[in-house]
């Protein structure tokens, strides 16, 4: 009988002891209602101010803080050059793309092209085709995109990129096309009057099994070519030319 009474007294005192410990721990942000979040939410910053309500961080108190500590969208759009050429361009030491081409300096940042002729650039998706690779687990399919970028004033670039998603392949192709931008030499047919409008001489090009020949043409002729080369020549800034 004494044994039963002593145990009941111990069990009866436990809730009071637990309550007393909870009150003491809540004063110092302790363990009541779970570890780390007890006592008026004191465990993670008090009053749900949490992880930085005053500094605009991820805190949930004081109007949620507003994620101010990470920077807005404007900071993401700011270009920070990674190469010496990019730093010279941003500082205004280089005035045009022709100065870069004159010294054969490789362009490693597409923002350099955007800096000079970004407002006049026009891009065209020439082709999107699925490509497959045979692996031990089966066939892996990706999408290859061909994109041409030009300003119709003597600059043209071609980019090819393969990705799992069509949008990513197009975006990657546009960046590569800007990095592969090259100048196009233009000339006249007959008298050198007005702006250059055609190729300066007869030009022959070959890629794989495809051959193309460009022949100067008088003003008003237009681009006499198939649909695909016509788009490329117009974006390069050539207005009159014969092809064969």
Image (tube, rainbow, N blue to C red):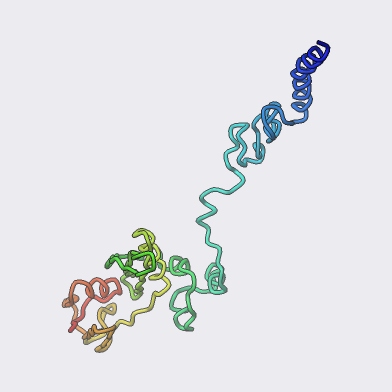
Tell whether 21 sits left or right of 216: right
Q: Pinpoint residue 26: horizontal percent, then vertical percent.
A: 74, 26
Name the image quarter holding the C terminus. bottom left
Quadrant of residue 220 within the rendered picture: bottom left
- Residue at the spot 72% in from the left edge and 30% down from the top edge: 31
Tell whether 73 sits left or right of 15: left
Tell whether 66 sits left or right of 156: right
Q: Pinpoint residue 139: horizontal percent, then vertical percent.
A: 33, 65
Q: Nearer the viewer, residue 237 or 209?
A: 209
Figure disc tally: 0
Residue 238 to residue 127: above or below: below
- Residue at the spot 48% in from the left edge and 83% down from the top edge: 103
Q: Nearer the viewer, residue 234 or 6?
A: 6
Q: Nearer the viewer, residue 239 or 55?
A: 55
- Residue at the spot 77% in from the left edge and 28% down from the top edge: 25
Tell whether 197 sits left or right of 26: left
Residue 27 to residue 130: above or below: above
Q: Pinpoint residue 90: horizontal percent, then vertical percent.
A: 54, 67
Residue 84 to residue 121: above or below: below
Residue 165 to residue 112: above or below: above
List the single residue furthest toward the front. Answer: 1
- Residue at the spot 35% in from the left edge and 63% down from the top edge: 170
Name the image quarter holding the N terminus. top right
């Amino acid at each position: 009988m004494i044994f039963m009474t002593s145990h009941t007294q111990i069990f009866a005192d436990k809730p009071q002891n637990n309550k007393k410990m909870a009150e003491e721990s809540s004063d110092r942000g302790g363990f009541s209602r779970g570890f780390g979040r007890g006592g008026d939410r004191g465990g993670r910053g008090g009053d749900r101010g949490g992880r930085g309500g005053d500094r605009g961080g991820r805190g949930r108190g004081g109007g949620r803080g507003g994620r101010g500590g990470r920077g807005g969208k404007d900071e993401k759009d700011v270009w920070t050059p990674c190469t010496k050429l990019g730093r010279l361009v941003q500082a205004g030491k280089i005035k045009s793309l022709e100065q870069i081409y004159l010294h054969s300096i490789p362009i490693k940042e597409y923002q350099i092209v955007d800096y000079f002729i970004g407002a006049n650039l026009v891009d065209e998706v020439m082709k999107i085709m699925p490509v497959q690779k045979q692996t031990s687990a089966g066939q892996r399919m990706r999408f290859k995109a061909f994109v041409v970028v030009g300003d119709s004033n003597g600059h043209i670039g071609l980019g090819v990129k393969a990705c799992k998603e069509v949008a990513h392949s197009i975006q990657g192709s546009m960046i590569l096309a800007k990095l592969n931008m090259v100048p196009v030499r233009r000339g006249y047919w007959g008298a050198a009057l007005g702006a250059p409008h055609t190729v300066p001489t007869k030009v022959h090009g070959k890629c794989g099994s495809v051959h193309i020949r460009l022949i100067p043409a008088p003003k008003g002729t237009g681009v006499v070519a198939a649909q695909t080369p016509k788009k490329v020549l117009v974006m390069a800034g050539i207005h009159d030319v014969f092809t064969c």
